[in-house]
Image (spheres, rainbow, N blue to C red):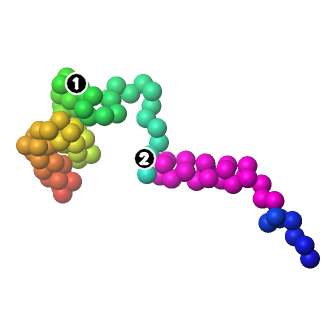
């Protein structure tokens, strides 16, 4: 009863499985890739003052807690913790209503 399955494993299948697992893990943690036509940069530190102002206006108009959290995160990354806390509290108020 000699089995040759475990003697010479197919390393290509192991490599392919590892790549698929890593890609699935990244997709679950980070979400899908952003669309190429998106106007908002990936990093809040790359966001200009006008883009941040537009995001604040959109958040105020829609009263969306997710947008308020994005604005808060952008201000936090810029080092303005006072505005970051202000918009974080607004997000909490919108979420509780």
Q: Is residue 32 above or below residue 53?
A: below
Query: Which quadrant is the N terminus positioned in?
Result: bottom right
Q: Residue at x 34, y 25 (%)?
A: 39
Is 27 in the magenta? yes
Which quadrant of the figure has residue 87?
top left
Number of marks in the image? 2
Q: Is residue 28 above or below residue 48?
A: below
To which residue does mark 2 refer? 30
Q: Position of residue 40 (x, y in %)?
A: 32, 29
Q: Residue at x 77, y 54 (%)?
A: 10
- What stretch of residues is rendered in magenta? 8-28
Q: Position of residue 72 (x, y in %)?
A: 19, 42
How dense is the environment of label 2, judged by Cα within 10 Å: few (below 14), some, or many (20 and up)?
Answer: few
Between the residue at mark 2 and the residue at mark 1, the CA separation in whole angstroms equals: 24 Å
- Identify the secondary structure beneath mark 2: helix
Which quadrant of the figure has residue 7?
bottom right
Numbered mark located on residue 48 in the image: 1
Please say whether residue 51 is visible from this viewpoint: yes
Asked whether 54 or 23 is in front, the reply is 23
Is 59 in the magenta? no
Query: Which quadrant is the C terminus positioned in?
Result: bottom left
How dense is the environment of label 1, judged by Cα within 10 Å: few (below 14), some, or many (20 and up)?
Answer: few
Q: Residue at x 11, y 38 (%)?
A: 80
Q: Is residue 92 above or below residue 73?
A: below
The single residue placed furthest to the front in the displayed view is 7
């Amino acid at each position: 009863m000699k089995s040759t399955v475990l003697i010479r494993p197919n390393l290509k299948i192991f490599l392919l499985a590892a790549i698929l697992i890593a890609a699935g893990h990244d997709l679950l943690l980070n979400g899908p890739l952003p669309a190429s036509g998106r106007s908002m940069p990936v990093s809040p530190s790359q966001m200009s003052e006008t883009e941040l102002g537009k995001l604040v206006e959109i958040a105020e108009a829609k009263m969306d807690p997710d947008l308020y959290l994005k604005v808060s995160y952008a201000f936090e990354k810029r080092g303005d913790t006072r505005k970051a806390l202000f918009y974080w509290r607004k997000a909490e108020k919108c979420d509780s209503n």
